[in-house]
Each structure stands twice: as C-alpha cells, then as structure tokens.
Amino acid sequence: MSMDQARIRRKSPIDRAAELQSAARDIALEDGLRAISLRAIAKRVGVTPALVSHYEPSMESLVARTFGEIVASEIVEASERIGVCESAVEKLSVFLDWMLDDERKDVTVIWTDAWSLGRGSQLLAIEVRTRMDEWFDLLAQLIRTGCATGELTAEDPDLVAYQLLGMIDGLNAHALVNYGATVSLGNMVRTLAEHELGLEPGTLA
C-alpha cells in the first residue's frame, strides 16, 4: 500500500467511530437489530472485525445505542410535524398518520427486535423503556392539551394514550406478516381514538 493510499484509509478515532455507528444504523434499518454484528459492520465499512471490536468492544451497548438513536430521530421528526399543526385534532390526526405509515416498516422491525432482544439485554431493555416513555409523553401531552382546550374529552388522557400506543404497536407488528388489511387496521385505531376522545366518527379519517 502506498503512503497516499494509507493516508486515505486512515481516519481519526472520532471519524472512525462515527463511521461504525453509521454502519450499524444502516444495517439495523435494512435488516433489523439482530443483523448487527462485528462481521456485518466490518464488511460494510471495509475493515477487519478486530478494528470494529477495538472501537466497539460491546455489541450489546452498540445495539442499544443504535436503537436509541434511530427512535430518538423518529420522535424528533414526529414532534416537528405535530408542532406546525394548530388544533389538537389536527395534531392527533398527523400523529396517527405518522405512526401508521406503511413506509415505517423498517422502524417497526427494529422495535419488534428490540422487544425480543431486550429480554436478554438489560442495556437494550432500559433504552426501549426510555423511548417508549418518550412516545407516550408526546401523545399524552397532546391529549391533555386537547382536553384542556375542550377539543378532546377524556376522563383519563394518559390511559387513552397508553391504549392507543399499545394498539398501534400491536397492529404494526401484525402488518409485518400481512395479518389483516393495513387500511382497516389504521381505521381501527382512528375509530378507537374518536370514541375515547369524544370526537364525531370520521373526524380522524
């Protein structure tokens, strides 16, 4: 290898760590958290597994961190979309559209992997609970605000938020194996939301 070639391939520790993290993220989005491994990352980046191990000695930590970063970016984007809406009903409609979007199947796969793998990984389990709390807080606050302004009605806004998220997670998981029609599943969630929040049928359609 020439000195020029070596200079091109050599990267600073910060740049190399970022490159490996990016590779882990790409692998997760393409094939799920289960596909993240020393060999998979090394192959994608074009380095040896030993080099990956040097920067990422704990795959458990890398998987948990990768999951957290992917979901955190999702929450930020969802919050930004909701933030430009004026009414609570519009915010809720946008939130449900986002959560039920068929284009988010890659993230649904990551979630189902995380719930399963989290049984054997305390680090991942902690990250999953943290991100689930963040999604819950976003939806619960939306519903609480809507109830405060009179746009929505609920005796227990937090319970409604929990029910909706549980239903969304379950139906999205069903969709991964083509169980049930995607359109009707989405309508089920919207119908439940309308019923629980005192909205006229079809308001969230």
Image (spheres, rainbow, N blue to C red):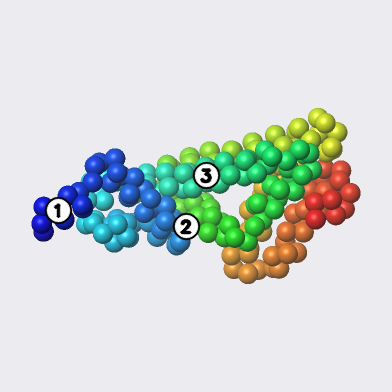
Q: Position of residue 171 (x, y in %)?
A: 66, 59
State how far apart marks 3 and 1 are (Cα). 37 Å
**Residue that mark 1 sits on:** 4
Residue 157 visible to the viewer: no
Q: Tell me the residue at 65%/68% (across/down).
A: 179
Establish if 4 lies above or below 130. below
Q: CA distance from mark 2 to mark 3?
A: 13 Å
- What is the residue that sits farthest to the right in this orientation? 200
Kindly identify the residue that appears in the image at 37 percent across and 44 percent down: 61
Residue 197 position in % (x across, y down) = 82, 43
Cβ atoms at labels 2 and 3 below 8 Å apart: no
In the picture, measured across the screen, residue 7 lies left or right of residue 182, that is: left
User: Which corner quadrant of the image does residue 79 belong to?
Assistant: top right
Left or right: 69 as drawn, with respect to 135: left
Can you see residue 193?
A: yes
- Mark linked to residue 73: 3
Figure quadrant of the C terminus: bottom right
Is residue 29 rendered to the left or right of residue 162? left
Residue at point 84% right, 37% down? Answer: 151
Location of residue 122 with respect to 28 vertically, above or below: above
Q: What's the residue at 43%, 47% (across, down)?
A: 66
Q: Which residue bears the numbered disc 2?
A: 29
What secondary structure is marked by label 2? helix
Front tag of 1 and 2: 1
Of 38 and 69, the residue lying toward us: 69
Residue 22 position within the rendered picture, expressed as x and y whole percent measured from the top left: 38, 50
